[in-house]
Amino acid sequence: MRTTVDLDDALIARAKRLALKDGRTLSAIVNGALAAYLKGRKDASKDEPFELIVRGKAGGRFPTPADMAAAEEDEDVDALRIVRGKRSAAP
């Protein structure tokens, strides 16, 4: 199919040099470049949707604010290496 498009002068010069170097026509270079671009766009749209897991397991119940606070407290205790146990009254 024959069509007319406006291309950047520097871009078309590079395409012509590539065509000459590869022994191909300018049309073959443009066709190949456009096909590769369109294939890349199609492949990018095929990405699977993902599920963002905030805490817990996928499909599990959503944690309550109390659950999250308890988990954060447990993480803080572990990080600070605080020994849990009964507190004895100070004399």
Image (cartoon, rainbow, N blue to C red):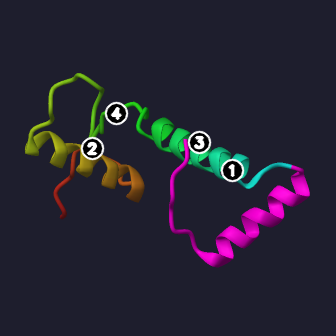
Q: Amino acid at mark 4?
A: Pro
Residues shaded magenta: 1-23
Where 64 sits versus 16, above or below? above
**Crowd around label 1: few <14 · some 14–19 · many ≥20 (10 Å):** few
Horizontally, is 25 left or right of 39 in the view? right
Gap between marks 4 and 1, in whole Å? 37 Å
User: Which is more foreground, mark 2 or mark 1?
Assistant: 1
Residue 18: quadrant of the picture: bottom right
Gap between marks 3 and 2, in whole Å? 68 Å
Horizontally, is 53 left or right of 9 in the view? left
**Pointer 3: what residue?**
35
User: Which is more foreground, mark 4 or mark 1?
Assistant: 1
Extreme residue toward the bottom, this view: 10
Gap between marks 3 and 1, in whole Å? 12 Å
Between discs 3 and 2, the one toward the N terminus: 3
Gap between marks 2 and 4, in whole Å? 45 Å
Where 5 sits versus 58, above or below? below
Q: Amino acid at mark 3?
A: Ala
**Pointer 2: what residue?**
85
**Horizontal and vertical percent for residue 27?**
69, 50
| Label at residue 50 | none
Between discs 4 and 1, the one toward the N terminus: 1
Between discs 2 and 4, the one toward the N terminus: 4
Between discs 3 and 4, the one toward the N terminus: 3
User: Which is more foreground, mark 3 or mark 2?
Assistant: 3
**Pointer 1: what residue?**
27
**Pointer 4: what residue?**
49
Between discs 2 and 1, the one toward the N terminus: 1
Gap between marks 2 and 1, in whole Å? 79 Å
What type of secondary structure mainly makes up the magenta span? Answer: helix
User: Which is more foreground, mark 3 or mark 4?
Assistant: 3
